[in-house]
Image: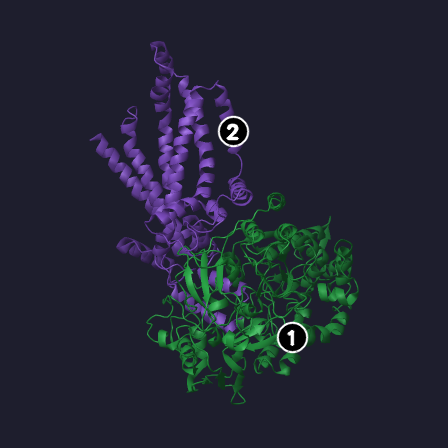
């Protein structure tokens, strides 16, 4: 019964969070000094397009109709929910009209999911395992060396890490092509070895940069957590019991220190759907981050809504899953 | 950050290893021209419809695939009829009936002949289909368009319109009108949503392959290139393949060019160019030496006043602010001395020397403010030349300095500026200016965050006005916010660039664009005259100018009077022209236009880029 109450309250919170977030996401751009029609006209005039003022005026009016931006904010809001609830349709992108937002997201999201889920999991595993060892065996020389390396890497701006990798591995030692896109010229996405091999090669540098930076964070946090847990009385008790060092490290220290890291992993997996903007820019890698950036700079309300909605769903769902599973992972947690 | 980047780039460039781009099997690098994509990644690479609002032309569509009726050689100012034969012929004195002759023997890339039926269909499509964004304008203009014979189009308008050719010609970047093949488009239901993939146009190249993620686009020369407009007019374009490829950030584009994997770059910063030229001996810009860049971009950059907001509604206040700007410092700090000064409200182009700058030179020198003060300083170009001469060995005589840095600009004279402000009731206490109502004078200059020129001018002018005693700040905003703030009048001063033009007839840009009819109250959207400047005489002259064809000498006569009013009034104050550093890497391809060989402007991202292609020669390097 207690679990049912807990579950219901969590699910209600889940939907409230989503509703409130999406309402804010809908309203904020509309009350900010940006306008999709102005953005498109601005793009045209910035290009120096020679357009008679009369034609510009006419275009302003017809674009508003084309984009469906006529009507009050309330009407637009009602239409938005109707489209979402009836068919999950975010409408057309304004900046890339008439391409639909759903299509743009569908084409970008797999690249983001593949790159970020893989690198998040790799850096999480590496960071946690190595962090647990160095935290438990804090006086060993290798622990000190690794801690210092992580301390040095962690504060380096990601931009510099990415640029250094490009210069080192694409220019000085041109092992990886300085390419753009998710695959080489002429290689089309499909389930065959040629594409997979090519996609792995193209994704290597952006993945490496994310693993390096991600590893630093997971390592340092796990290192600190393990040090704390290692001071607990139950660890001393295990030592007195005569358990081996590895048994204590993995079964007592790491297992307990892992709990907050699992929560953090779940949340990190949720934020994957925000994309990795700087990675995508630096490595010219296709993904949802760049799409969101473009949506914001071009006041593409529909595209913004589409991407952020997915992100809100993902983060909220990750939180819900953690909330539901946590009591099973950590028996100390009891339902209220 | 720029310095760090430069140092890092220079350091690694010194190792200079070659790593060739991987092209698909059967395509050799020596036959392929690799071009930069101006706007970066194309978000919707399946969209090839130039009438869809979200279309992108900069990845090859409008540079090598589509052709326009007329192109402008913006370097020489000459009209180049590409699909048309000669100029449009006005059939009556009121410019409501027109005839356009087409070149014979041009074919669409699918083998169907290009005829007057296609042009008439395309015009009527714009005039009758509401889903096309510029429909309203064309609907109000076009009464009828029909094919008189296979190569002659007859157009009848609902109202007189002498500027018809500017709708069809690529004056700057590209025109409104893009002719489409009737045999394909007549079957389309919704023109704004039609993808038009694969694209069929008359240009000399066809789409061969593209990245579904929008990072590259490969084009192949048509076997029947001689049946394209370019083939008929200029000759055979040299590269067999053209690859549009976006490497992304400037750092990556520089490295790619240094590795000879990018033959042509769109707009580098001065710092980026410095990094490239120091290492890549094949890299070349417009000038062989300082000031490097191409100074003929058709928009002058400067500050725009919101004339609907006091105190900027007072022209003497605007003049005071102008005299508190040190243009030499703007050029030096903002652009490393590489730009031309622009005292007129049209860009400092070579094409404007003969019609405007030379005839108005004695007038501008003698021009005075109401108190008799003559603000023009013709010595500024010489001063700038002398400053850079020791480092770059450039000539300092007045004529050479004028060619390189323009005709001059307004004096930097804070004393006169102070005098003007005090005459308008402003007061200065402890070095700070106060408005006539006693409040401290604060100015926010809105800059376009995505454009270096706009950003730099905003920051430097704000600094100079602060030194003058005004509490001035720069606010840099994103593109959409910049435009929206302009359109609704939600700014005091901005660093926009309304002063654009490429041909002697500037009616379509600052002529009609600065007409009082566009002025709307603050808060309401206006797409033109965002400075909300009302001048009856200027508007009358704009109406007068509208009556003449762009090539009519009367246009220039009226244009000179309009420029005089703009100089007196200064609703917008251009400071410098725009210099584009658009380098090429000549490792694989030679024959690019340069200052020493000015057959075309280096406008790689404009529709007229295709006119350069027949001039390119392979170097033979594999």
Residue A244's image quarter?
top left
Q: Which residue is mark 1?
A: B562
Left-right relation of A232 to A86: right
- Residue at position x 36%, y 67% from top? B194
- Marks 1 and 2 sit apart, C-alpha to C-alpha, by 67 Å
Vertical position of residue A123 compared to residue A47: above or below: above
Quadrant where the C terminus of chain A sits is: top left
Give x and y (percent) for residue A186: 41, 56
**Color used for chain B?**
green
**Color used for chain A?**
purple
- Residue at position x 42%, y 84% from top? B144
Nearer to us of marks 1 and 2 is 2
Q: Which residue is mark 2?
A: A149
Q: Chain of mark 2?
A: A
Q: Chain of mark 1?
A: B
Left-right relation of B249 to B443: left
Camera sees residue A98:
yes
Who is closer to the viewer here, A78 or B84? B84
Give x and y (percent) for residue B316: 69, 64
Give x and y (percent) for residue A61: 43, 68
Give x and y (percent) for residue B598: 65, 69
Numbered disc 1: secondary structure: helix
């Amino acid at each position: 019964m207690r679990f049912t109450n807990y579950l219901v309250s969590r699910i209600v919170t889940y939907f409230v969070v989503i509703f409130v977030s999406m309402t804010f996401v809908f309203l904020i751009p509309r009350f900010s000094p940006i306008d999709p029609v102005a953005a498109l006209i601005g793009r045209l005039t910035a290009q120096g397009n020679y357009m008679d003022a009369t034609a510009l005026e006419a275009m302003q009016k017809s674009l508003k109709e084309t984009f469906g931006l006529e009507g009050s904010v309330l009407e637009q809001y009602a239409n938005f929910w109707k489209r979402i609830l009836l068919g999950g349709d975010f409408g057309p992108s304004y900046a890339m009209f008439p391409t639909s937002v759903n299509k743009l997201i569908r084409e970008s999201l797999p690249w983001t999911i593949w790159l970020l889920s893989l690198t998040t999991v790799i850096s999480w595993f590496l960071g946690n395992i190595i962090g647990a060892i160095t935290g438990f065996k804090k006086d060993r020389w290798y622990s000190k060396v690794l801690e210092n390396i992580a301390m040095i890497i962690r504060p380096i701006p990601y931009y510099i890490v990415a640029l250094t990798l490009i210069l080192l591995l694409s220019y000085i030692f041109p092992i990886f092509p300085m390419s753009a896109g998710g695959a080489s010229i002429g290689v089309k996405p499909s389930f065959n070895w040629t594409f997979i091999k090519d996609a792995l090669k193209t994704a290597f540098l952006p993945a490496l940069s994310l693993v390096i930076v991600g590893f630093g964070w997971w390592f340092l946090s796990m290192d600190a957590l393990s040090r704390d847990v290692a001071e607990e009385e139950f660890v001393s008790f295990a030592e007195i019991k005569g358990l081996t060092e590895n048994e204590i490290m993995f079964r007592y220290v790491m297992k307990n220190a892992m709990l907050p890291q699992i929560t953090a992993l779940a949340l990190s997996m949720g934020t994957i759907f925000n994309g990795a903007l700087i990675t995508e820019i630096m490595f010219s890698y296709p993904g949802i981050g760049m799409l969101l950036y473009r949506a914001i700079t071009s006041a593409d309300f529909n595209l913004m809504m589409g991407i952020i909605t997915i992100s809100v769903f993902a983060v909220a769902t990750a939180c819900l899953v953690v909330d539901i599973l946590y009591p099973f992972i950590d028996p100390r947690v009891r339902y209220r | 950050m720029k310095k760090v980047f430069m140092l890092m780039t220079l350091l690694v460039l010194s190792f200079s290893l070659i790593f060739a781009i991987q092209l698909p099997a059967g395509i050799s690098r020596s036959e392929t021209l690799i071009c930069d994509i101006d706007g970066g990644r194309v978000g919707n690479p399946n969209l090839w419809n130039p009438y869809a609002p979200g279309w992108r032309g900069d990845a090859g569509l409008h540079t090598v695939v589509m052709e326009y009726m007329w192109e402008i050689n913006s370097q020489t100012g000459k009209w180049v009829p590409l699909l048309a034969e000669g100029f449009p012929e006005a059939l009556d004195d009121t410019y409501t009936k027109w005839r356009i002759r087409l070149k014979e023997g041009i074919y669409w890339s699918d083998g169907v002949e290009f005829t007057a039926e296609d042009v008439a269909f395309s015009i009527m499509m714009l005039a009758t289909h509401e889903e096309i964004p510029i429909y309203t304008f064309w609907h109000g203009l076009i009464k009828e368009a029909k094919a008189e014979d296979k190569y002659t189009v007859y157009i009848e308008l609902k109202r007189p319109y002498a500027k018809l050719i500017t709708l069809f010609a690529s004056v700057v970047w590209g025109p409104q009108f893009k002719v489409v093949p009737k045999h394909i488009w007549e079957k389309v239901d919704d023109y704004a949503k039609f993808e038009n993939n694969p694209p069929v146009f008359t240009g000399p190249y066809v789409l061969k392959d593209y990245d579904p993620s929008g990072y590259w686009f490969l084009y192949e020369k048509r076997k029947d290139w001689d049946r394209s407009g370019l083939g008929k007019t200029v000759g055979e374009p040299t590269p067999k393949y053209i690859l549009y490829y976006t490497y992304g950030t400037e750092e990556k584009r520089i490295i790619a060019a240094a590795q000879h994997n990018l033959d042509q770059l769109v707009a580098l910063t001065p710092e980026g160019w410095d990094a490239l030229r120091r290492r890549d001996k094949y890299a070349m810009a417009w000038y062989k030496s300082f000031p490097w860049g191409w100074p003929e971009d058709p928009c002058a950059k400067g500050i725009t006043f919101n004339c609907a907001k006091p105190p900027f509604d007072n022209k003497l206040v605007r003049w005071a602010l102008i005299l508190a700007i040190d243009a030499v410092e703007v050029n030096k700090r903002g652009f490393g001395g590489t730009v031309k000064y622009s005292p007129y409200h049209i860009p400092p182009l070579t094409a404007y020397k003969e019609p405007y700058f030379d005839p108005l030179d004695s007038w501008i020198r003698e021009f005075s403010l109401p108190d008799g003060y003559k603000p023009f300083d013709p010595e500024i170009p010489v001063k700038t030349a002398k400053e850079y001469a020791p480092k770059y060995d450039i000539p300092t005589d007045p004529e050479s300095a004028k060619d390189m840095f323009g005709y001059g600009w307004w004096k930097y004279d804070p004393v006169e500026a102070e005098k003007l402000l005090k005459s308008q009731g402003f007061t200065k206490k402890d070095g700070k200016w106060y408005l006539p109502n006693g409040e401290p004078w604060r100015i926010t200059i809105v800059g376009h965050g995505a454009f270096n020129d706009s950003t730099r001018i905003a920051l430097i002018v704000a600094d100079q006005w602060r030194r003058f005693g005004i509490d001035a700040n720069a606010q840099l905003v994103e593109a959409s916010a910049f435009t929206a703030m302009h359109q609704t009048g939600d700014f005091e001063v901005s660093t926009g660039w309304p002063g654009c033009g490429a041909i002697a007839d500037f009616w379509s840009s600052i002529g009609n664009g600065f007409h009082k009819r566009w002025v709307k109250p603050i808060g309401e959207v206006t797409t033109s005259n965002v400075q909300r400047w009302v001048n009856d005489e200027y508007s009358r002259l704009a109406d007068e100018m509208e009556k003449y064809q762009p090539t009519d000498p009367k246009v220039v006569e009226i244009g000179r009077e309009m420029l005089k009013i703009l100089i007196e009034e200064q609703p917008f104050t251009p400071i410098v022209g725009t210099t584009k550093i658009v380098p090429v890497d000549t490792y694989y391809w030679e024959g690019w236009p340069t200052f020493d060989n000015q057959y075309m402007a280096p406008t790689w991202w404009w529709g007229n880029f295709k006119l350069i292609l027949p001039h390119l020669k392979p170097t033979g390097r594999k």
